[in-house]
Amino acid sequence: MSTTREFDFLVIGSGIAGLSFALQAAKHGSVAVVTKRDAVESNTAWAQGGISCVTGPDDSFDLHVADTLDAGAGLCKEDVVRAIVSDGPARIADLMRLGVDFDTHQNDGMEEIDLGKEGGHSTRRILHARDTTGREIAEKLLAAARAEPTIAFFENHYAIDLITKRKLGFVTEDQCLGIYALAEDSGEIISFRSDRVILCTGGCGKVYLYTTNPGVATGDGVAMAWRAGAAIADMEFIQFHPTCLYHHKLRSFLISEAVRGEGGVLVDKHGNPFMQNYDRRESLAPRDIVARAIDHEIKRTGGPCVYVDITGKPRKFLQDRFPYIYQTCLDAGIDMATEAIPVVPAAHYQCGGIQTDVNGRTSMRGLYAVGEVACTGLHGANRLASNSLLEGAVVAHRACADIVTHDPPDGASPREYDIPAWVSGDVQDLDELVVIYHNWDEIRRLMWDYVSIVRTDKRLKRAATRLTNLRREVQEFYWNFKITADLLELRNLVDTASLIVDSAASRKESRGLHYTLDYPATDDSRPPQDTVLQRT
């Protein structure tokens, strides 16, 4: 007999998207926030650079829109871009009311927000809290959400699958009715029932061997939505951050783009700049261009990495502006005030995801997706730096408004459909656990080798063949063995990796983050099209 919990709103994930939505929804009904680890563990908390928003006197919505469209390589939806950019100032005001402390400076005796600049931006528009902006936002949002009596947190509860009408045997319009989740402490499978499910699970960086993402980024939301039949778009566009620290122990540590925004220059092992050979914007070109340039330089020279040189800045400036990066590098034996920082690209951001409109509405009734897990059309084929936190805050607010307008809670818990108890295998075999861990490693390695910055049809076919076999093995484990968090993450990894490969194989051109040697040119003979996959 499994436990069923009912709520007006069910939020999966606890980053800026999930917590922003929860705080808005708490005004209208009961809210459950389900998160597979501690609530503070999210991609948001790892964000260093900041959040982009039109704030300065030399900026405008039109400029921000133009920069976003340029970075997106023709695939952004301009109406979506304009809506999100225009809503930005109001959401920044919300964050500041919650106590988010963005950096400021004095200008003629007046205190002003200190704005940074990053690649692809034509002016300074990045609000930041030193170099730990995401942590500052996450902590303030989490404190506010925990103080709300109508918000209940279910930490260390791993969402397994969406519950839908179709899975219950209905043949009419499909609808999301909740989730099954594994309570890791007890091993119990709990049914969470709600007619308003909001996926805010973040991205899928752990699909790759090298990533800047935390361990929670295993593509859970995309995999669950795809298995349930929701439309998935543009998964071939995986952004590789150009500058992950090259160090044998700190393989996931990001050297923020803000370092280049403050004067850092990309150089080779001899200290020679090279980005002028690839783009007029040099070290501040959009991330897809910079990542490919670094990849090319590493392959051309045979070196293990390139370098970011910001030694022209005073030590005190670096300590004040980048205290976290400065100290981490120093602990690793690198004094960024006197020596260049070794860097390599690493998987960073999922630009595609569950297809939604600008209000987070998916193709399935009752299911919304917000943040990195979603594909609104803001990012197109390549995300403009620091637009991700902006999107999470703006779309969360719009999603809540959309739900309250079209499907408001009526004050009573939904009881129209009975949810059957979870049934799973109960076999435990320690030898099989070894196979699970091996498969986890194999997926991440083959994705790095075959489906990373530069692709070919041959590499994609090799990846597809092996993933087909891995999916078969994982499905066998899933149905026959006792459910564990490791098995669930492996299942989501293999499904998400397969979606990336299938999407990449179907795009016969190079555009933005998708670059293939077999089709090196962008196909301008027809309007850019989304790559949409949907399970039938």
Image: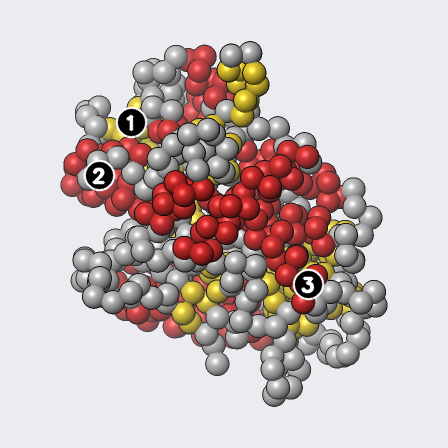
How far apart marks 1 and 2 lie (CA) works out to 13 Å
Disc 3 on helix, strand or loop? helix
Label 1 crowding class (10 Å Cα cut-off): few <14, some 14-19, many 20+?
A: many
Q: Position of residue 173 (x, y in %)?
A: 60, 82
Q: Nearer the viewer, mark 3 or mark 1?
A: 3
What mark, if any, has residue 265 been given in the picture? 1
Disc 2 on helix, strand or loop? loop
Please tell me which residue is depicted at 40% across the width and 22% down the height of the picture: 333
- Amino acid type, mark 3: Thr
Picture quarter containing residue 401?
A: bottom right
Label 1 near label 3: C-beta < 8 Å?
Answer: no
Q: Position of residue 414 (x, y in %)?
A: 78, 72
Q: Quadrant of the N terminus?
A: bottom right
Q: Position of residue 418 (x, y in %)?
A: 76, 79
Identify the residue position indicated by label 2 in the image: 279
Q: Nearer the viewer, mark 1 or mark 2?
A: 2
Q: Is residue 327 visible?
A: no
Label 3 crowding class (10 Å Cα cut-off): few <14, some 14-19, many 20+?
A: few
How far apart marks 3 and 2 lie (CA) works out to 46 Å
Question: Seen in the image, is 497 located left or right of residue 103?
Answer: left
Tell me which label, 3 or 2, sits earlier in the chain.
2
Q: Nearer the viewer, mark 3 or mark 2?
A: 3
- Amino acid type, mark 2: Asp
Q: Is residue 187 above or below residue 151?
A: below
Q: Is residue 453 visible?
A: yes
Please tell me which residue is depicted at 23% across the width and 41% down the height of the picture: 293
What mark, if any, has residue 405 been given in the picture? 3
Q: Is residue 455 above or below residue 52?
A: below
